């Protein structure tokens, strides 16, 4: 029993500092962008949890160590984004290690997004495939062109759920009393055009 109480207390202390840093504006682009490093292409996740059955909080994890590649042929452009799972930063190291295992497995396999753009302009929606632990999942990203001081960029966002990606997030405490994750999962990011590497 003492071990259970200790584990629950550690889990609570790991997430408590983020109460003040929670993001509350659903779908507000600026609320997401403000977490990114200037002059970098980045991705992030937003997840929600319920604490002690009545307190809601949001958790943001940011990763600015991604690789973007583009291969062009007569039919259009193939875009590939590789995301190292161990580089997500939520401000709590214990949680970041758990997220890396959750998304990449014991081998820390990177997340990969691939898509094909058949037109010369950026569409408002982009269909592609997200690879998590070598499993493929079809996704549709909402896109928005941005003109920023650090160069032309594209903001993207995907509203989804853990279930859609076969992700099972553990509860903490009896019946999830300490921490109970909500099902909704938001993936978002910003891609700077000058960060895309041309592949032949």
Image (cartoon, grey):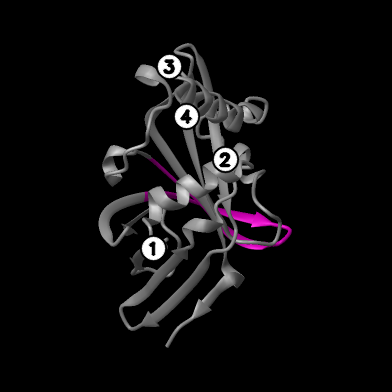
Q: Nearer the viewer, residue 21 or 145?
A: 21
Let me know if residue 171 appears in the view: yes
Query: Which residue is most to the top?
Result: 54
Gap in angstroms between the C-alphas marked 3 and 4: 15 Å
Q: CA distance from mark 1 to mark 2?
A: 33 Å
Image quadrant where residue 90 sits: top right
Q: Nearer the viewer, residue 199 or 169?
A: 169
Q: Is residue 23 visible?
A: no
Asked if labels 4 and 3 touch by Cβ distance under 8 angstroms, the answer is no
Disc 4 marks which residue? 48
Looking at the rendered image, the disc whose residue lies closer to the viewer, 2 or 3, is 3
Residue where numbered disc 3 is placed: 177
Whichever of labels 2 and 4 marks the residue nearer the N terminus, that label is: 2
Outermost residue on the right side: it is 149
- Which label is found at residue 74? none
Q: Residues within 10 Å of mark 2 (few under 14, many from 20)?
A: some
The secondary element bearing badge 3 is classed as loop
Q: Residue furthest front?
A: 2
Q: Earlier in the sequence, mark 1 or mark 3?
A: 1
Q: Is residue 39 above or below residue 31?
A: below
| Residue of label 1 | 107
């Amino acid at each position: 029993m003492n071990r259970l109480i200790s584990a629950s207390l550690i889990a609570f202390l790991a997430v408590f500092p983020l109460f003040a840093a929670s993001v509350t504006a659903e779908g507000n682009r600026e609320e997401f962008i403000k977490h990114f490093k200037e002059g970098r292409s980045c991705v992030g996740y937003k997840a929600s949890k319920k604490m002690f059955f009545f307190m809601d909080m949001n958790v943001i994890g940011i990763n600015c160590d991604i690789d973007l590649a583009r291969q062009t042929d007569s039919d259009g452009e193939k875009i590939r984004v590789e995301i190292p799972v161990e580089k997500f930063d939520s401000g709590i190291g214990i949680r970041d290690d758990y997220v890396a295992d959750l998304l990449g497995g014991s081998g820390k396999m990177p997340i990969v997004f691939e898509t094909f753009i058949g037109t010369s302009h950026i569409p408002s929606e982009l269909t592609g495939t997200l690879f998590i632990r070598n499993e493929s999942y079809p996704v549709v990203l909402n896109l928005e062109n941005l003109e920023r001081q650090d160069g032309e960029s594209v903001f993207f966002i995907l509203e989804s759920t853990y279930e859609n990606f076969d992700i099972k997030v553990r509860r903490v405490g009896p019946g999830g009393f300490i921490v109970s994750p909500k099902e909704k999962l938001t993936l978002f990011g910003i891609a700077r055009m000058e960060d895309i590497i041309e592949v032949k």
